[in-house]
Image (tube, helix red, strand yellow):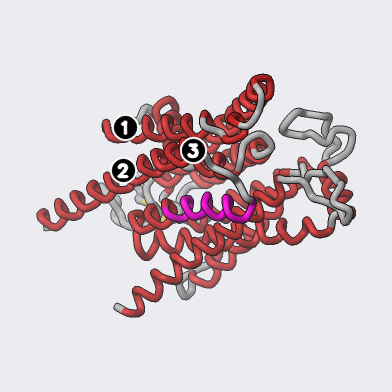
């Protein structure tokens, strides 16, 4: 029992510490880097460099985890999900647990077509993640990081929408109540901005326009993220891969993709490629040469993001989704509070109320998931 509690404490501490440091590093990379005299207004704009650093670190971390935890005698192709055992009657769509079903007497290797379909699914997720990241990063120039954290907490909204429109899924009524709470909470948080109360009418209009633009960028980011999550669910249900396998392949494809884009002389594209006239790699290198202190938060962002993902999968594998939901819920709350303390954000009573409503919605979602899981366990126990 003590060993299990120690393992759980390690997972909780890992998720908390890694993602709290990750959040601070991400916010640091999104604000101005000051020079010695404090007069510089330069900002780091190469989100592709941040993506490349984090995806490369995450793919290496997943590869190390898969290699170190694979079964004795298991090949790396099998450990990475290339050689997968499926039911002979499943045509490559069953889970890779090696259990034969239906008329099948023994599991067989997945066909090459099924493997290509799986790898294409990983690549599609990598493309969507690469496209989503710039919108979230640029949104931080227009909204505060606490607002970003609350917005990210509303991922259920785009995930439900993408499941609804792409895969025709139906949801219970409580999920719509959760979506309503999340929407009302984030709306209150944006409406009761402290900056609006202290400025003139014209300045209020300008601030409102900036926040609306930032919120629009965040919505685009969340929609793309929601498409990624729904696609991941589809991949897992069709191919039965593990979280670490998905983590490795998605981040590997993302690293290759962002590296190729970084060295191409692309034209100026608002939000997606602001450094027109030179490659993304050249712009990032010039920035680091002028502000070498930016390398530290970049390294923290990449390393803690990769390790944090591993702690998430370890928690999910050993303690289930309920424990993970509880940990991530409280972690987001502490992330917002830590950002307020470290970067001196000022929140109005209305913003605290909005934040409370958002976390109330997330808590309702977690509690209902727990009830559903307990009911399923009870039904299985009764059937047994």
Main SS of residues in magenta: helix
> Residue 205: x and y, percent?
64, 21
| Segment colored magenta | 330-343
Kindly identify which residue carries mark 3. Answer: 351
Q: Is 333 inside the magenta-drawn segment? A: yes
Q: Between tags 2 and 3, which lies in front? A: 3
> Residue 92: x and y, percent?
42, 45
Q: Is residue 19 left or right of residue 380?
A: right
Q: Between tags 3 and 1, which lies in front? A: 3
Q: Residue at x 54, y 64 (%)?
A: 17
Residue 364 bears which disc, if any?
A: 2
Q: Quadrant of residue 147?
A: top right
Q: Quadrant of the C terminus?
A: bottom left
Q: Along the polypeptide, which appears first: circle 3 or circle 1?
A: 1
- Dots 1, 2 in contact, CB < 8 A: yes
Residue 369 bears which disc, if any?
A: none
For marks 2 and 3, give the CA distance: 20 Å
Q: Secondary structure at mark 2?
A: helix
Q: Secondary structure at mark 3?
A: helix
Kindly identify which residue carries mark 1. Answer: 177
Q: Along the polypeptide, which appears first: circle 2 or circle 3?
A: 3
Image height check: is 181 above or below 65? above
For marks 1 and 2, give the CA distance: 9 Å
> Residue 252: x and y, percent?
64, 52
């Amino acid at each position: 029992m003590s060993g299990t509690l120690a393992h759980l404490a390690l997972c909780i501490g890992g998720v908390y510490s890694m993602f709290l440091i990750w959040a601070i590093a991400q916010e640091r990379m999104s604000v101005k880097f000051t020079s010695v005299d404090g007069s510089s207004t330069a900002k780091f704009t190469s989100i592709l460099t941040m993506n490349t650093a984090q995806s490369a670190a995450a793919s290496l971390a997943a590869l190390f985890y898969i290699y170190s935890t694979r079964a004795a005698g298991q090949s790396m192709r099998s450990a990475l999900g290339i050689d997968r055992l499926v039911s002979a009657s499943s045509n490559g769509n069953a889970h890779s647990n090696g259990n034969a079903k239906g008329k099948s007497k023994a599991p067989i290797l997945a066909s090459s077509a099924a493997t290509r379909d799986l790898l294409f699914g990983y690549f599609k997720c990598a493309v969507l993640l690469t496209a989503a990241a710039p919108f979230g990063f640029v949104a931080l120039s227009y909204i505060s990081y606490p607002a970003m954290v609350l917005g990210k907490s509303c991922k259920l909204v785009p995930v439900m929408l993408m499941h609804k429109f792409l895969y025709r899924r139906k949801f219970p009524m409580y999920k719509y109540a959760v979506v309503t709470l999340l929407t009302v909470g984030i709306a209150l948080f944006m409406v009761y901005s402290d900056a609006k109360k202290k400025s003139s009418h014209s300045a209020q209009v300008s601030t409102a326009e900036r926040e609306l633009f930032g919120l629009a960028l965040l919505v685009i980011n969340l929609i793309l993220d929601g498409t990624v999550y729904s696609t991941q669910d589809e991949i897992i249900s069709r191919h039965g891969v593990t979280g670490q396998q998905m983590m490795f392949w998605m981040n590997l494809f993302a690293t290759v993709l962002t590296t190729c884009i970084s060295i191409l002389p692309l034209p100026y594209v608002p939000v997606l490629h602001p450094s027109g006239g030179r490659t993304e790699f050249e712009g990032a290198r010039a920035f680091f040469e002028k502000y070498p202190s930016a390398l530290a938060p970049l390294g923290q962002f990449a390393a803690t993001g990769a390790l944090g993902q591993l702690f998430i999968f370890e928690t999910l594998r050993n303690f289930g989704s309920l424990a993970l939901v509880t940990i991530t819920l409280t972690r987001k709350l502490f992330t917002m509070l830590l950002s307020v303390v470290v970067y001196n954000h000022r929140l109005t009573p209305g913003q605290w109320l909005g934040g409370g409503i958002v976390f109330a919605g997330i808590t309702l979602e977690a509690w209902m998931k727990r009830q559903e899981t307990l009911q399923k366990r009870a039904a299985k126990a009764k059937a047994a």
